[in-house]
Every structure is written in C-alpha cells, then in structure tokens.
Image: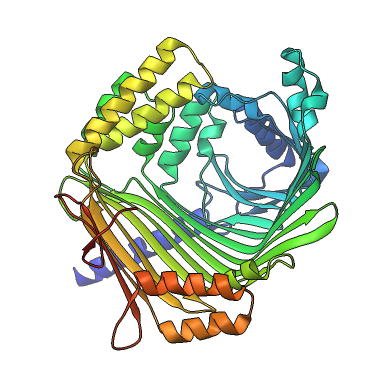
Amino acid sequence: MRKKAIVILALWIVSGILIFNGCKGKLPVLEKEKAVDLIKRINAAPTGFQIEADASAIAIEADPKSSKRTPRYFIAISEPKITFNPSVFEEIYFPIPEFVLDFDCEKVVLHYGPEDSYLGLTSVSGLSFEMNTQDILGPSVEKMKTSTKEIPKASFKFSYGEFSLDKLDISPILKEDATLYELITKVASLNQSVKTKLEKFNVEVNTEIEKTGTHQIKISVDNILSGMDIDPDFVKSIYGQTEEGKEKFAELLKEPRTLFDVSLDAEGISFSYKKDGKEKAEVILDRVKFGEYLRPSKEKGFYNFGIAVDLQDSSLIYAENKVLEILGKIKQLKKEFNIDHLSPSLIQTYIELMNISQSLGMEASEEAAAEMSAYGLKMMNELIQSKPIISFSLSPLEHYLGKLEAEGQFQIHQLQAPPPGKATATLYDLAGLEDRIKKENILQAEKLKGILDIIRQYFVEDKKGNGKLTFEVREEEPYLFLNDKPFKF
C-alpha cells in the first residue's frame, strides 16, 4: 500500500512538471502581419489617434513571464507616424475646433496577448509636436466669417524623452463598435491604480502681439513620477452620466470609499520668460510634490477632499526687480488644504452641476442659464446642510529671509455670515528677519519702515522673539478678532 502511494505521488509530481513545462515552454512566434493588423484595430477605435508604421519598423519579442496557453508579446514600433484629432471628445461634451496634431515619435511599445485579446501600453519614447494658433483656429474662424489675421500669432512646442508605465490595460480599444464613453469608463475600471514616469519634459510657447511684441515661455522638467488611484464609478459619473447611472452612483456614495487619490513628484524644474528676444525671468525649482484626493472622512458617512503641495529649493532670476528675486528664494514651502465633512449628496450635486456645465458648453440661452442657476441654488443648499470643515496648514514656509508656520480651521454653517473658526501664524525670529531685510538694501528707508511696522503691528512678539498672530471668526458679532481684539478690514 505504501509503495502504491509513493508511485502515485511520483506520477503526480511528474505530470505537474510536464504541465508546468508545457505552459512555460517556448512561446509560438507572432508574425508581423498580426502586429500590423493590431495597429489597424487600434486605429479603428474612437480615440482620435491614428498610427502608421511599416512592418519593417516593427520588432516583436515574446514576454518570458507569459505562458503558451495565454502568450503575450512586446511589440516595439519604431518611428511611427502618429496623428490626433481631438474633436472626438465632442461625444463627451467637450466642444473642440476640428484640427489634427502630427506627432514625431521614436518608439511605442505595446504589450499584446492575442489569445485573450489583451492590450497594454508599456512606453512611448521621444514624442514631440508643434502647432500654431492660425492652423488650428483658422478653419473655425473662417466659418464665423472672421479674418484669421485677428488671431494672435502663437506657436506651441512639446516634447519629452520617455513616458513609461508599470501597467496600463487598454484592451477595450480592441472591442469593435465601442464608443469613446465606453472606452474611457472600461479602461478606468481596468486601471484603478496606475504609476507612470516621464523624463525630459519640455514645453515652449511663442507669441507675437502687435502692441506688446514677442514673448517666449519655456518650461522643462527632468523627471516626473505620478500615481493615480481612481474609482471607476467616479469616472462614469463625470463623463456622460445617465439617469440610471445617477441613481446607482448616489447609492454607492452612501458608503464612502476613496474616489480618487492622485500624486505627482517632479524634479529639476525650470521656467524662463523672454520678451523681444531678451531674457526677462527664470525660475528654478529643485523638487515639487503634489497630491489631491477625495476619500472617506474620519466621521462615518462623509467625505474628505484635500490638496497638498511640497516645494523645495526655488530661486528666481529677475534682473529688473531685485525684490522679486529675494522673494523667490524659498528653501521649502509645505502647504495643505482640506475640506472635510462633505456629504454624499453634496458631491453628487457638484458632479451633476459639472456634467450640466459640460453638456451646455457655450450655449447662452435662457433655458441653459435657468438650469445652471437651479443647480447652483441646489449646490448652495447642500453646502449648508453638509456643514463642511475647511482647514489649512503652512508647515513650514522656510524662506531665505525667515520662517513662517500657520494653520487654521473654519466650519461653514451658513452663507450670510463668515464661517466660525480660528487661524494662527508664527513668524520666527522677528529681529533676525528685520536684520536680513535691512542687509539686502533693496527697499527705500520709508518703504522698509512701513513693512516692518506692519509686521510688528500684526505679529505680537513673545519671550522667544517669535511673532504670533491669531485670527478668529466667532459666531456672535462683531465676528472678526485679531489677536483677541475686534477687527475690521
């Protein structure tokens, strides 16, 4: 009996190994013709994008992590011709003039599974395009019987080195007869959490205005890391929500969950401005972090909306104004803004208001104005019912001249009076701040004295030499208090 059991176990192990090797063996070859057919299927989707590439520009590599049962392949398309027509977004209430953007691109890498109709976007490298206002707006202006000479001359250049993703499932694009709304909502459902990396991002805008001359703005960023967690039902609620969808989403909102959580981390940022070919200003930032979210509040049944910004090491070069140069020397600015205690019905009403605003577009009829006004009143009523709590913090603003910290919290009870609450601020080392301002010698004595007098007027110096400011809104008149004394603007 024991020998029989050993034999059965051995056979089971051997069969498992054979099955595993069968699944993980050499994958079948994907012919280039199938990759060309895949591009045609992508072009048939209502995304506004068109890709042209010869078979000779396509390289296919089997994904070693996939199996023979569901093989997947990396398809690299070198120097494809890419065009984009944004008018496709009219389907979801975005009125856009008809024009086509032509992109230069070094390489696009797709992740394809022919057996299970899977399609992923892995990376897009060396993308760039140029456009100008007369080419884009000219046809629309001609329809309005207006001369294109009235359009300011402006050109726009955009480029980046590489855009890569950890995972972006765009399989719904392969489905025939899908609408743009279906694609957006289904792609959102498949990609509730996405992380991306963008390298060597550059934007250049050139304008020519008869009265003010030529202007040039350049923005460049070395690296941008971003993350996005988004609820697919939230996406559906924003784009083309039906009556049935409204009711469903309203029910889902009653049990708060994270609707979106977005983060961005950018390094090596520069901004420059030229006028008539002469350098006017340049801003350099070492690092900027940004976050935005809408998630459950600590109090059951409510939502919490927040924005956070963390800026590190900025400098401003502005030869015409040394005061601004000094003000631009920021070591760190860490700011948070928060609106808590948001009811599900308030969020639903806000989304409906945005949907109506998009659907009406530029319509200026009395009916459109009345509909917007009705939703605006409904929004105000929901705001009062929700009694949201607004809070903020500046922790810290560390500047070349000194350091400031602030925080506050206010709650909206009604719209006829300011929201009650309290805010405090600390300006560290008042004496040192005054000495540094005087040392820079950038202000006339009279202006300098006026600024220092204002600081001393509002910031009360404590035993440590720090300035303290307290601003309070009370529920009874006179409502406003500064440093515990009645205050009027």
Where is residue 142, by image quadrant?
A: top right
**Residue 440: image location, x then y, percent:** 62, 81
Query: Which of these two is toward me, 153 or 289?
Result: 153
- In the rendered view, would you say 133 is above or below 448? above
Residue at far right of view = 277
Looking at the picture, the colour scheme in use is rainbow
Q: Is residue 332 at least partly visible in the picture?
A: no
Q: How many marks?
A: 0
**Residue 293: image location, x then y, percent:** 37, 52
Query: Which of these two is toward me, 429 or 220?
Result: 429
Query: Which of these two is toward me, 322 or 271?
Result: 322
Residue 136 falls left or right of residue 68: right
Q: Is residue 473 at least partly visible in the picture?
A: yes
Residue at far front of view = 446
Query: Which of these two is toward me, 166 or 205?
Result: 205
- In the rendered view, would you say 232 is above or below 151? below
Residue at far bottom of view = 464
* Residue for point 73% across, 55% down: 218
Where is residue 15, by image quadrant?
A: bottom left
**Residue 283: image location, x then y, percent:** 66, 65
**Residue 221: image location, x then y, percent:** 65, 62
* Residue for point 79% across, 30% down: 134
Quarter of the figure with the N terminus: bottom left
* Residue for point 21% across, 32% down: 251
